[in-house]
Amino acid sequence: MTKVSRRGLLKTGAAASVLAATGVQVAAAPSRGGTLRLGLAGANTSDSWDSRTHSDSYMIMAGHGAVFDTLTEVAANGELVGELAESWEASPDAVTWTFKLRQGVTFHDGKAFGADDVIASLGMHTEEGAKSAAKPIVSAITEMKKLGEHEVQMTLKAGNADFPFLLSDYHLCMFPAGNIEASIAQGIGTGMYKVESFDPGVRTTLSRVDGHYKDGRAGWFDSIEIIAINDSSARMNALMTGQVDAVNRVDFKTEPLMKANPAVNIFEVTGNQHFTFPMLTNVAPFDNVNVRKALKHGVNRQELVDKILLGHGAVSNDNPIGPANQYFADDLPMNDYDPDKARHYLKEAGMDSLDIDLSASNAAFPGAVDAAQLYQASAKAGGININVVQEPADGYWSNVWLKKPWCACYWSGRATEDWMFSTAYESGVPWNDHFWENARFQELLLSARAELDSDKRRTQYHEMQALISSEGGTVIPMYANYVDAHSTKLTNSGTIGNVFQMDSSRFMERWWFA
């Protein structure tokens, strides 16, 4: 077996952000104690502890960021480290992976963690009827073999150099074998915090687990209260008035007020988050590539960055691979705002004009409704008449996304190219929100996944990004920085993760009261 280390692979210029300029006061050493009060967007009344269903920030943070653990974890500096897996080795072709598991780990109900739990927890995602976004990760495993109580061997359909990264996916939480249903009902994991109360879409309270295997290196709060505050103005006000200690998704309209408040710090990192407008390409008129091209040239990208992000991001070229990815293609031909080109492509599609609905809610991303209206205004000059349909925030991800032909959406991006592509662009995966089919793209996806030569992978991933940008079914006008805020009472190590918002959704483990 060959031990595969990806150390440093993600540590590109943007992959780790030291935030001295943001006002974060870094303590000499972590201190234990206190109750953390978080005000979070992304909560829904349909929320549960079933990690297969987690799709927005509230449950992602409460799940793999507090109550549960995954096998691996992307550290704040972008390096892959073990969580419930201590180490891993791969065969030379990256088809067979062997994971050694941590010993002495227990679930919150006292059951010891071991190999059986790994096999059962991963198996959940391929059960009949399971609607898991991580299904493509697990379905690539042809065999899971228990080599010992704390050792598991997994054989893949084909080599995958990024496989250990994929196992840090927030859907792949570990549950106790034989008791999974009760674990989902009660929130029984191996995480640093156990559930005291859970009112979906409203409030969650957690308490620190004593004698946890991460003692001394994470988990500094005695207890945590997570409050659902989906309204951005109310969320910012809760922080500025001291009702909560930290919030996600800073409302850029209130940012000047927050910066003027001496008790508040804003922290910002550049990651791979992107705000999108996916269209179902199996539904007319989006099944016509020329209609898709017209829509790509109908949006004023810089205007959205200026007016929606207020500069907290950058123009995207309909590319889901972001500036913090290793193989980011920043030299693609630009889908610039050009009403004449939009009209040209409409004519190529046999149309003089186009009338379409665009569903939007600020649940999709902060300012999504305003962004849709700006899109509406810019597209009109190209003969595209967009009717903006304002959708309710509650239930947006279950009732609108993947259901309405064209809508607003956001993606956190992923730490590796294959992780992003296999989650949202591989043919037939549950979270493919555009149903775009391209034979060459799918061929490259499988080839690049198994390719261990970095230069060859770069060439393949660049071609894939070019295909999505020019022909794909998603308009991606902007990359958005992660901009969150906290009380000056809080501090951290000084390095903040950028895989997801709020320190890669590990805020509860990595921060403490100064």
Image: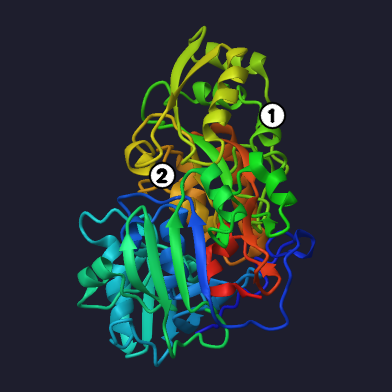
Q: Is residue 509 above or below residue 48?
A: below
Return the x and y of residue 362 as percentages of the image width and height: 49, 37
The C terminus, quarter of image: bottom right
Q: Quadrant of residue 181?
A: bottom left
Q: Residues within 10 Å of mark 2 (few under 14, many from 20)?
A: some
Which residue does the image show at 44% across and 52% down from the upper left?
56
Instruction: Say what secondary structure mark 1 lies in.
Output: helix
Task: Determine which of the numbered discs, if any, sits on residue 432 in the image.
Answer: 2
Identified by mark 2, the residue type is: Asn
Q: Is residue 201 above or below residue 466?
A: below
Q: Quadrant of residue 200?
A: bottom left
Q: Residues within 10 Å of mark 1 (few under 14, many from 20)?
A: many
Residue at the extreme right of the image, as rendered = 21
Return the x and y of residue 391 as percentages of the image width and height: 40, 31
Q: Is residue 345 above or below residue 396?
A: above
Return the x and y of residue 389 as percentages of the image width and height: 43, 24
Residue 352 appears left or right of 180: right
Which residue does the image show at 47% across and 68% down from the upper left?
65
Identified by mark 1, the residue type is: Glu
Task: Determine which of the numbered discs, if any, sits on residue 303 in the image.
Answer: 1
Report how many numbered discs are placed on residues in the image.
Answer: 2
Label whose residue precedes the other's in the sequence (2 or 1):
1
Q: Nearest the camera: 329 or 206?
A: 206
Instruction: Say what secondary structure mark 2 lies in.
Output: loop
Could you tell me if residue 334 is visible in this image? no
